[in-house]
């Protein structure tokens, strides 16, 4: 008597607690959300093959999960979009994990069946980086646990889906803080650690990736690993700023430092770009301030000629009471425009909240965002920045656009895959444009501008910060990583041997 179960019996056995998907048809490469769908998919596959394959040949048993595997249209459509609203690659399924074990389970499953996988945090990528055409998108938001602060070691362990705003509140309750923040706090820890995590404090303390003590990750082969500078260090280096190519971050242990109670913010206006950048360079080399960045605004004629240097000094207990005269000595700003204000530390960190709320209310948050994010060599930053800015008007960059310069010290950025220029000072140059989502011509024009600007910067020895919208080829990526390319390529072969992870980045052909 045959021991092969009936198709109906198998389908009953594939039902996953808490999940919407019951089977994966290996012939049609499709998921089935019900037994009837699975029957249909298998019948179609059998017909196409002009044969009748057995159940085991066409139906792969979906493992038992603590969370949910979704194939409904709404979930797939959401996962095929991001903050950029430019690229739309539709996955075949979305995993909403109930545990780290779910991530391990599904990465093993996808590795076995060669299904592309992309982790997705807050969906803030602007160019399809967290999308997986025909594959699986793993939402990391459910992995948002924030542990207790270890005051002895000054660390905190958090889930990859935790937002930096939540982490900040938890650590400030103990008088501690992560050393560096991105300007927008509602991003996930796993998301920013995958790209680098730059902020105005980075010139003093490095990027967020430079302040990680340990990671827990799941490799492309489905191996759950703890790694650190002294434990599986090759994987640790390949994951931080590694754009999700070798593993999915599920947990991070972060370094903490004493937090100030209040900060003092200085806004200084400059009439020309060269002087503005030179003073930024002086400030970061001398370490006068804890936070330094700058913005460029249009003047009355619409030309981007108003340069505002923003510098922040931390007060006690993180630093001494700010001395205005000492901090501003020798700077060449317009003295008539100086603005100085004190505010609570968390209010400073969360300063974008009112602006973003206004953008959402005005509908601008839903615009397309063809962002340009470049790393300019310090020696040519003024010339390269001018080539971009001189050709821009407010109408070109769209409503709510922001233009930023962050000065960075190369010796503070120690993570190999976070690439800058070889100059001792580099500048992160951001043109955060917006365009009406249905204005394809405007989006394509801005993408072409981005590519042209990238080519000029790369020729001058610069790179890009990979959170923007620049059309790149695998050859461009190899040039971008430069001497770090061989290490990334080796780690990819070791930890994601079937190349299933983060295809949206377009790094490996």
Image (cartoon, helix red, strand yellow):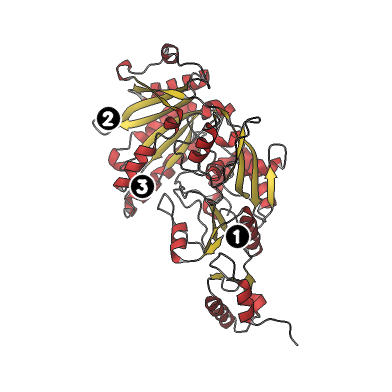
Residue named by callout 3: 365
Tag 1 residue: 66
Image check: 133 left or right of 4? Answer: left
Q: Is residue 341 above or below residue 16?
A: above
* Residue at (43% x, 27% y) in the render: 344
Whole-angstrom CA distance, mark 3 to mark 2, is 24 Å
Query: Is 195 left, or right, of 486 in this rendering?
Result: left
Q: Earlier in the sequence, mark 1 or mark 3?
A: 1
How many other residues sit within 10 Å of disc 3, few (<14), some (14-19) or many (≥20)? some
- Toward the viewer: 76 or 434? 76
Q: Residues within 10 Å of mark 1 (few under 14, many from 20)?
A: some
Give the secondary structure at mark 1: loop
User: What is the number of callouts on the image?
Assistant: 3
Of badges 1 and 2, nearer the viewer stands 1
In this view, the mark in front (1 or 3) = 1
Q: Is residue 373 left or right of residue 398?
A: right
Mark 3–mark 2 contact, CB under 8 Å? no
Q: What is the x, y in percent for residue 350?
A: 43, 35
Looking at the image, is 295 positioned above or below residue 101? above
- Separation of disc 1 and disc 3 at Cα? 33 Å
Nearer-the-camera pick, 270 or 67:
67
- Is residue 312 among the parts visible in the rendering? no
Q: Position of residue 340 (x, y in %)?
A: 36, 20
Residue tagged 2 = 299
Question: Disc 2 on helix, strand or loop?
Answer: loop
Sequence-first disc among 1 and 2: 1
Please report contact status of discs 1 and 2: CB closer than 8 Å, yes or no.
no
Q: Earlier in the sequence, mark 3 or mark 2?
A: 2
**Residue 63 at least partly seen:** yes
| Mark closer to the observer (3, 2) | 3
């Amino acid at each position: 008597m045959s021991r092969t179960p009936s198709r109906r019996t198998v389908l009953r056995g594939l039902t996953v607690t808490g999940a919407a998907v019951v089977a994966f048809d290996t012939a049609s490469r499709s998921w089935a959300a019900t037994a009837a769908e699975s029957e249909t998919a298998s019948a179609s596959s059998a017909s196409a093959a002009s044969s009748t394959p057995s159940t085991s040949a066409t139906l792969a048993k979906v493992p038992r999960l603590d969370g949910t595997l979704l194939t409904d249209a709404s979930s797939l459509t959401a996962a095929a979009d991001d903050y950029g609203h430019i690229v739309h690659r539709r996955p075949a399924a979305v995993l909403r994990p109930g545990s780290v074990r779910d991530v391990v389970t599904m990465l093993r499953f996808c590795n076995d069946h060669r299904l592309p996988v992309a982790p997705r945090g807050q969906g803030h990528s602007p160019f399809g980086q967290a999308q997986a055409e025909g594959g699986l998108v793993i939402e990391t938001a459910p992995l948002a646990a924030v542990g207790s602060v270890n005051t002895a070691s000054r660390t905190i362990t958090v889930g990859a889906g935790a937002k930096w705003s939540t982490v900040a509140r938890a650590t400030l309750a103990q008088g501690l803080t992560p050393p560096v923040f991105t300007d927008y706090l509602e991003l996930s820890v796993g998301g920013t650690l995958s790209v680098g995590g730059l902020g105005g404090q980075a010139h003093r303390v490095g990027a967020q990736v430079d302040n990680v003590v340990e990671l827990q990750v799941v490799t492309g082969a489905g191996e759950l690993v703890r790694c650190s500078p002294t434990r599986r260090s090759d994987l640790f280096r390949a994951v931080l700023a590694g754009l999700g190519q070798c593993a999915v971050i599920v947990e991070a242990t972060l370094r903490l430092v004493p937090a100030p109670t209040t900060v003092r913010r200085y806004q200084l206006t400059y009439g020309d770009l060269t002087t503005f950048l030179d003073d930024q360079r002086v400030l970061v080399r001398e370490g006068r301030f804890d936070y330094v960045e700058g913005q460029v605004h249009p003047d009355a004629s619409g030309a981007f000629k108003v340069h505002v240097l923003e510098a922040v000094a931390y007060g006690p207990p993180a630093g001494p009471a700010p001395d205005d005269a000492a901090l501003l000595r020798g700077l060449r700003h317009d003295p008539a425009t100086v603005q100085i204000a004190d505010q609570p530390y968390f209010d400073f960190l969360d300063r974008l909240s009112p602006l973003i709320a206004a953008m959402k209310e005005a509908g601008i948050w839903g615009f397309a965002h063809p962002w340009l994010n470049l790393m300019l060599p310090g020696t040519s930053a003024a010339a390269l920045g001018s080539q971009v800015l001189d050709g821009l008007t407010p109408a070109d960059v769209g409503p709510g656009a922001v233009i930023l310069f962050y000065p960075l010290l190369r010796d503070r950025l120690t993570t190999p895959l976070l690439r800058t220029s070889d100059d001792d000072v580099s500048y992160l140059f951001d043109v955060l444009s917006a365009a009406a989502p249905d204005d394809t011509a405007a989006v394509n024009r801005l993408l072409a501008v981005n590519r042209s600007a990238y080519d000029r910067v790369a020729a001058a020895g610069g790179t890009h910060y990979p959170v923007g919208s620049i059309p790149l080829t695998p050859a461009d990526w190899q040039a971008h990583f430069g001497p770090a390319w061989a290490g990334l390529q080796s780690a990819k072969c070791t930890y994601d041997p079937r190349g299933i992870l983060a295809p949206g980045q377009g790094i490996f052909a």
